[in-house]
Image (tube, rainbow, N blue to C red):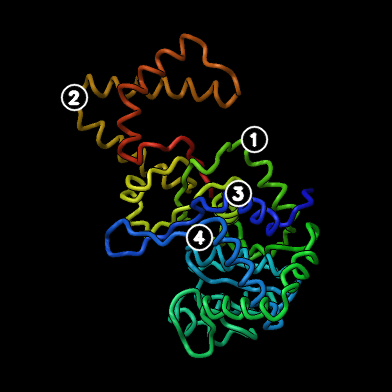
Amino acid sequence: MSSRTLYQVLRDTSREHGAKLALQQPQGGGGRKYRTWTWNEYLTAAEEIAAGLRSLGIGKGDLVAINSETRAEFYLADLGIMTNGSVAAALYQSYPAPDLLKTIETSGAKALFVETPKMLTALRSAPVEHFFLLTGEAEGALTLEQLRERGRAARAADPDLLSRITSNVTAADNAILYLTSGATGEPKMVMVTHGAIVQNIEMGPAVLPAGPEDMTIAFLPSAHITQRIVMELLPVASAVPVTFSESLMKLPQEMKSVRPTILVAPPRFWERIYSSICTEVKKRKPLQQKIFWAAMGAGLAAAKYRREGKPLPLHVRWPFRLADRIVFHKIRARFGGRLRLAISGG
């Protein structure tokens, strides 16, 4: 098991890549305007949130729930909770409010982050001591910025506060409470330590070599373990910048504009892409259809060798190169142009 905590992973990445892009979130309006965070800003936010939580009496081992779509503020809050030594539990937004309230009560959460004032209204009866809003404002809840202000004030009053907090959190301490039901049924609560998570993401480069020159788009629910590990925490270790999708409806256009090199999506997503490509192919002339299916055969043959870690023999390499030049580059252009690794999660 790794000896580092998730805070130490973020701190180490900030030291090496501080001014580089870490997160970017669309600002709406149909344009390409983004709010961005560097790795230094990501680290600062996590530290301020941790200090803010500690100033409110939320300490090591206390459970903090988060109910939010996948967005930058979720990432900041999540790392802030774990920096504080508290345990982060992401809720599935698709669950009805009574089920979420039951889960919050059963988990013993001491505080709750929610995304919007409307969501806060639905969960106002949750048996927690503190409510925090990731966006907007509402009576009885601190905004994320107000929580960060408390953290800054607490650190100004006690310069050693952060070092005491982080030095008391070890790899053996719990970091995340997963609330997963698997395929069906009630949420099954599973605690995972910092060390176990970091061990996973430290092994990531062996199968997913990536770095600051790459880009990914996050859109899966953050309660999903694949999203949490591969799209939130692995990028922290690899310094891969993350763009957040504005909506599933806009994802195809976002792929073209953001041009991700890595993308994690459920099987149904890839099936829809494949189906749309096949629909287009059927509209083509018979010769073009034959070329497409021949290219698919060459691609599958090449994929077989690559999965086995073997070099492509000449009789596979040349047909694949020809297929890539004639067919595959057009498909890549349609879906972003730079995608080099697609991962099926779910």
According to the picture, the residue beneath numbered tag 4 turns out to be: 221
Horizontal relation, residue 3 to residue 182: left or right:
right
Q: Is residue 1 visible?
A: yes
Which comes before the other along the chain, label 3 or label 1?
1
Residue under the point 57% across and 75% down = 148
According to the picture, the residue beneath numbered tag 1 turns out to be: 206
Which residue is more in the foreground, 153 or 270? 153
Residue under the point 65% across and 69% down = 81
According to the picture, the residue beneath numbered tag 3 turns out to be: 234
Distance CA(mark 2)–CA(mark 4): 41 Å
Nearest to the eye among marks 2 and 1: give it.
1
- Tell me residue 75's x, y (percent): 55, 62
Which comes before the other along the chain, label 4 or label 3?
4
Residue under the point 78% across and 70% down = 164
- Residue 92 to residue 196: above or below: below
Horizontal relation, residue 331 to residue 209: left or right:
left
Nearest to the eye among marks 2 and 4: give it.
4
Secondary structure of residue under mark 3: helix
Which comes before the other along the chain, label 1 or label 4?
1
Distance CA(mark 1)–CA(mark 4): 25 Å
Three-letter amino acid code at the position of disc 3: Leu
**In which image quadrant can residue 179 be found?**
bottom right
Number of numbered tags placed on the structure image: 4
- Residue 41 to residue 141: above or below: above
Nearest to the eye among marks 3 and 2: give it.
3
Horizontal relation, residue 35 to residue 211: left or right:
left
Secondary structure of residue under mark 2: loop
